[in-house]
Amino acid sequence: MTSRELTGLLPLGDADALAARRRPRALGDWAWRIGFGAITWPWLLASLSGGRKADKRALLDELGLPHDALPHLGSWKADVGFLRHIVREIARARPANVVELGAGASTLIAARALAQHGGGRLTSFDQHDGFVRATRDWLSDHGLHADLRHAPLVAESRDWPGRWYDIDSLPDSIDMLIIDGPPWAVHPLVRGAADSLFARLSPGAVVLLDDAARPGERLVARRWRKRWPHIDFQLRHDGTKGTLVGRRRDTSIPVANDNERGRAWRHIARAAGIAALIATGWIARGEMGEFPQSAEASTFLDEAAASHRTGLLRQSMASQVESATLNPGEIRRSTGITLPPLPARWRIDDVQLYPTSGSPALAVSITTPDGEQLSFFADRAETPAESRPLLARRADDVIAYWEAGDMAYALTGRATAGRIMTLAAEIAPVL
């Protein structure tokens, strides 16, 4: 929900929204809103900028739009990071049917990206009738078109709290689902009801959820991961508010029923998470020791171990070109991967991007002054957190792994567990 003009800090209000507010709310809903309002303010404060002006100009240049095509971004409006995800996914997947919940700047950007990359139908829903008309005119001014529809928040979801869009006439198959509404003030978990559309996702379809770093949206993401195991969800922190990116993997669509919900948790976390405490962004930490607890980040650990073995193999092959240049700034700009400082006395032998399921990771081959060959592996974590290193084994490899912010890290070698932990302590955060 973003007008082309400079908009206020709070979401829009109109007759539909006011009428809906007159309906009595359950006491539990009020408790959720008050409780999450108390803990969500740091995320709301961080989102006020909406991203750097230079990044916005670069995005508009890429799309061939004038620099004044977008308003000030931030607060409840989509930020540059989320808009760039929309452009990247449209360029990659060339979707035939895109459905959007919450119109505005994202509608303009999606419509332009579709026009650049072979067309495709964009159907956008918003609860504000006047805003839908204004957005339609906004697109028309730039020679763009979308099927914009007024969908007041009057529907009730069986599985999620809060009011939901009165949606009709959806495509049978959705290739991209953009979720930027309703606002959290309706209920912190209200956007979870977007999974009522997941059964329409085509194979390979992508889901983009804005504001994904907020506590409410993190709880939504956790439940989605349990209910929709055939969709891989990753939290990306390359914007001011975070974007949850979901990709449908297979052709079957299991729908969780009431008896299935609430059963055993699926352990599908990719990064070094143990149990996310959503309200604070921290994860539970085990005590440091030989092997303090079993590793649960199995996919991440497998990738870290594989990158270590590949690095050793590359160094043994004269035909393989290696690069010892490590440029953290270039890596962050290109991949979104943030690297901690590595000890100056460690020698960097090779730096390579390593393909993973959702995005490229980084593998750095290192030799210590004592001649130990290590691999440092970095990838974006699903749940931003901080943790002291934990230990795991993969065959002959010993891995120390931890998270810092929205990144997951692993240091792998074939020394003793105590030695690997000592080396990891030189780059892991001191807690």
Image (spheres, grey):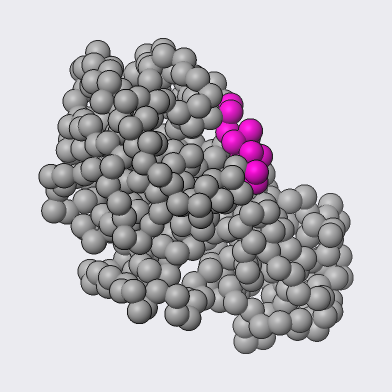
Membership of 370 in magenta stretch: no
Q: Position of residue 296 (x, y in %)?
A: 60, 77
Membership of 42 in magenta stretch: yes
Picture layout, residue 71 above or below residue 294: above
Magenta span: predominant SS is: helix
- Side of 367 relative to 318 (left or right): right
Q: What residue occupies the far bottom of the structure in this picture?
A: 395
- Side of 175 relative to 296 (left or right): left
Picture layout, residue 71 above or below residue 360: above
Pick the quarter of the image with the C terminus: bottom right
Pick the quarter of the image with the N terminus: top left
Q: Along the line of sight, which residue is nearer the eye, 90 or 168?
A: 168
Q: Along the line of sight, which residue is nearer the eye, 207 or 133?
A: 133
The answer to whether any part of residue 158 appears in the image is yes
Q: Residue at x 33, y 32 (%)?
A: 19
Picture layout, residue 168 above or below residue 361: above
Q: Residue at x 85, y 70 (%)?
A: 422
Q: Position of residue 352 (x, y in %)?
A: 57, 56
Q: Position of residue 367 (x, y in %)?
A: 77, 65
Q: Position of residue 353 (x, y in %)?
A: 54, 56
Segment tinted magenta in the rendering: 38-50
Residue 378: name its quadrant. bottom right
Count of numbered circles in the view: 0
Q: Residue at x 63, y 69 (%)?
A: 275
Q: Residue at x 64, y 71 (%)?
A: 274
The answer to whether any part of residue 314 appears in the image is no
- Side of 266 relative to 395 (left or right): left
